[in-house]
Image (tube, grey):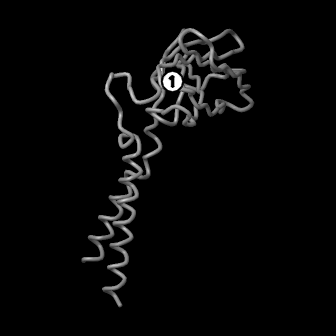
Amino acid sequence: MRYSIVSILVAFLFIPLAFAHSDLPSFEKTVDGYLIDVGYSIEHPEPKQDVRFTFDLYSGTGDAIAFAPFKAVTFTVSHEGETVFTKTLQNVAPNVPALTYAFPESDTYDIGISYERADGKSEATFQLPVGATSAHGHVDSVWDERMHYILGTGLFLFAAFCIVVMIRQRV
């Protein structure tokens, strides 16, 4: 009985870890019937920290939403009205373009996205705060971003401890 309870407890502790990567932030905006979806790897990036961006384009609504084909996507970073970085990525496979970029300093950046479709363009601009000050005006803690790693490691160590105790009790 004791073995079953511990096994169930350990299984429930690992459930949040299975979904840890699916809650990454993204910019989403509907333009002319197309949903522009730009995912990024770090919710509150710091200067010189690599941020991975992924680009998807969808058409339709509700249950009828589907990937929309596009030829290329242009990613532009602007700071105080000046272009800091621009890159055009060809879409060689359905909806897989991605790139990594590190913002040079703390501030709010404009992120311009332009999808080139066979029948036109879909464009949107988003803002991304970089550094200690968030979009809400408060100072973000490094703990906010890394807490799920710390929690996951703690849960893993607890589970390992429980397994060792169970093995020693059986011997």
Position of 86 relative to 3 (above/below): above
The amino acid pointed to by label 1 is Ala
Judging by the rendered image, the residue that carries numbered circle 1 is 64
Quarter of the N terminus within the rendering:
bottom left
Is the residue 139 above or below the residue 167 in the image?
above
Is 47 drawn above or below residue 136 in the view shown? below
| Residue at point 68%, 15% (across, down) | 117
Secondary structure category for the residue under label 1? helix
Check the image and name the residue furthest to the front: 105
Question: Quadrant location of residue 171?
Answer: bottom left
**Residue 39: horizontal and vertical position, in percent?**
53, 30
Q: Where is residue 83 in the image (x, y as percent from the top left)?
A: 63, 14
Q: Identify the residue at the far bottom of this view.
A: 171
Dot 1 alpha-carbon crowd within 10 angstroms: few under 14, some 14 to 19, many 20 or more = few
Question: Where is residue 135 drawn, in percent x and y?
Answer: 38, 22
Residue 137: quarter of image? top left
